[in-house]
Image: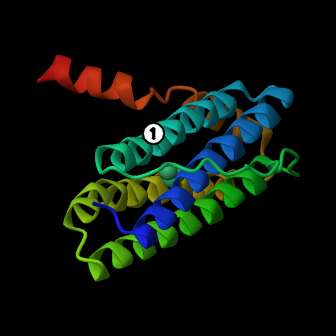
Amino acid sequence: MLSQSVQDALNNQINLEFASAYAYLAMSGYFESANLTGFASWMRIQYEEELTHALRLFDHMHDRGGTVRLDAIAEPKAKFKSALEAFEAALAHEQKVTASIHNLYALAAKENDYATQTMLQWFINEQVEEERSVGQVVDWLKMAGDSPVALLMLDQKLGQRGSEAEDEGEAEAEA
Ligand code: FEO
């Protein structure tokens, strides 16, 4: 059984994951408008992944007899000065999500909620990956500087990102 404080924190995290999805969809739209379709595709896949994060928490709440509360989501930022500004915003956002997951884990530990701690292990690992991949793009964009050629090469590279489901399918096919 979930304590009320863990339920409240899980509901806040569900909201943050949906807000992440919304933020990345807005960034995808920004890149579509700029005709940087590789960046747009990367952000759209990120959007889809965030929805799966929210649903993981949604399912855990119901598995444990909790009550989901879907709060309002604020309008996300949709205009950026550059691709770098958008990805720096994404990195700051992921760092905020990581801190929130860690606080949630600490609360679950304090409340002796072992099942929630186990469920959150996946998120702790996922945040390492998320910060690494977004931080990598930030570094590449800094290296690209003002070069349109470098930006277009990065756009091509990011357009090659597959969805998590596709990646897992490929891994299974290779196994
Ligand atoms: Fe679900 Fe990118 O944090």
Residue 5 in which image quadrant: bottom left
Q: Nearer the viewer, residue 67 or 128?
A: 67
- In the image, what residue type sits under mark 1? Leu
Q: Nearer the viewer, residue 90 or 64?
A: 64
Q: Residue at x 25, y 69 (%)?
A: 113
- Residue that badge 1 annotates: 55
Q: Residue at x 29, y 44 (%)?
A: 63
Provide residue 79's location: percent of width, then percent of height.
Answer: 88, 46
Give the vertical position of 32 relative to 137 (above or below): above
Provide residue 90's location: percent of width, then percent of height.
Answer: 65, 55
Provide residue 172's location: percent of width, then percent of height.
Answer: 18, 22
Q: Quadrant of the C terminus?
A: top left
Q: Quadrant of the N terminus?
A: bottom left
Left or right: 114 in relation to 130: left
Provide residue 21's location: percent of width, then percent of height.
Answer: 62, 42
Query: From where the camera sits, is residue 137 visible?
Result: no
Give the vertical position of 46 relative to 175 (above or below): below
In the orientation shown, which residue stands out farthest toward the left? 175
